[in-house]
Image (spheres, helix red, strand yellow):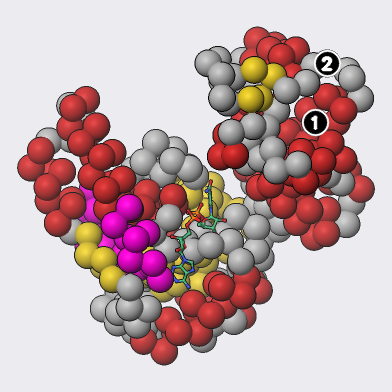
Amino acid sequence: MANIEKLGVVGAGQMGNGIAHVAAQSGIKVLLQDVAASALDKAMATIAKNMDRQVQKGTLTQADRDAAIARIARTTDAKAFGECDLVIEAATENEEVKKKIFAALCPVLRKDALLATNTSSIPITRLAAATDRPGRFVGMHFFNPVPMMKLVEVIRGLATEEATVQAVAQLAERMGKTVAFAADYPAFIVNRILVPMINEAVFALQEGVGDVASIDAGMKLGCNHPMGPLELADFVGLDVCLAVMEVMHRGLGDSKYRPAPLLRTYVEAGWLGRKSGKGFYDHGTTPPTPTR
Ligand code: NAD
């Protein structure tokens, strides 16, 4: 596989629309697919709004914006990917959903086409084994929001061929991203390091070492982090943080990855962070008020 000129994206949610946006802006033709037509409408509206903002800021011309939008086709047909050089799966984080997508996708893909997944937590090797092309299957982990975040983790499954790794790394660079190469271990690189730090902040909160404001001020002003760990947990979603800890705890079998009981309690209360309005902060006030 030489250059990737036609990209399929499965799933038009937060990540799928960001991947489509950046790829189209980089001159690549994109076919964006979702089971829900409403998700496709919403994705196109989000892409248009985000590109308009770039035009207003002077980082994109109106002509380039129009050309980029014109490069994105959309479909609800799961079998429309026959001409794609690469398909990136960015659908709901659920192993069965992803395996069903691959089962429908593989028979219609060209034999030499590559397949990537944006999963945050499912082993790449296990997903690869559910396809007809483990050598041409790879993890391509983008960060949210995709147009803003410069990193892509490229994750090799056990069977991933070097040519596959190089092809998607080249694509990521063409999209203006920097690649970090990761082995297929639970949570890869960034979440492996970030989420235990958040979990430790929740342990510190639970034990009364500090309150929410002190813990976040400590890490912002003492370590120069742009956001405190609890503020960041609210941004990421406490359910997502808990799920990542559980994946690491199960996958690595080390008690140092046990989720903080208070994190679980917040999730059980439905206090999931910004998306539910309340987490370690109440987001109904300006500025948000600490809940502990
Ligand atoms: P999301 O819920 O915003 O979007 C998922 C989309 O997938 C929805 O539009 C849904 O309709 C669609 N979908 C579900 N089943 C489908 C199917 N069978 N075929 C086609 N589309 C289908 O989710 P998201 O946050 O964009 O996450 C997508 C993937 O990216 C997940 O694997 C997640 O782990 C990963 N990821 C998320 C983030 C993040 O911060 N949100 C960061 C990195 C990676």
Q: Where residue 37 sits in the image (x, y, percent)?
A: 33, 66
Q: Which is nearer the eye, 266 or 14? A: 266
What residue is shown at x 12% (from left), y 51% (from top)?
A: 67
At label 2, the amino acid type is Gly
What residue is shown at x 88% (from left), y 57% (from top)?
A: 253
Q: Is mark 2 within 8 Å of ligand 1?
A: no
* Residue 104 colored in magenta in the image: no
Q: Is residue 131 left or right of residue 241?
A: left
Within 10 angstroms of label 2, few (less than 14), some, or many (20 or more) residues?
some
* Residue 38 colored in magenta in the image: yes
- Choose top left, top right, bottom left or bottom right for residue 216: top right
Magenta range: 23-42
Q: Which is nearer the eye, 32 or 34? A: 34
What residue is shown at x 75% (from left), y 12% (from top)?
A: 214
Q: Which is nearer the eye, 160 or 219? A: 219
Q: Where residue 203 sits in the image (x, y, percent)?
A: 85, 31
Give the residue number, with chain letter if any, for mark 1: 202
Quarter of the image that includes the N terminus:
bottom left
Q: Where residue 72 sits in the image (x, y, percent)?
A: 22, 60
- Can you name the residue that lies furthest to the top here? 221
Give the residue number, with chain letter if any, for mark 2: 210
What residue is shown at x 18% (from left), y 59% (from top)?
A: 71
- Choose top left, top right, bottom left or bottom right for residue 6: bottom left
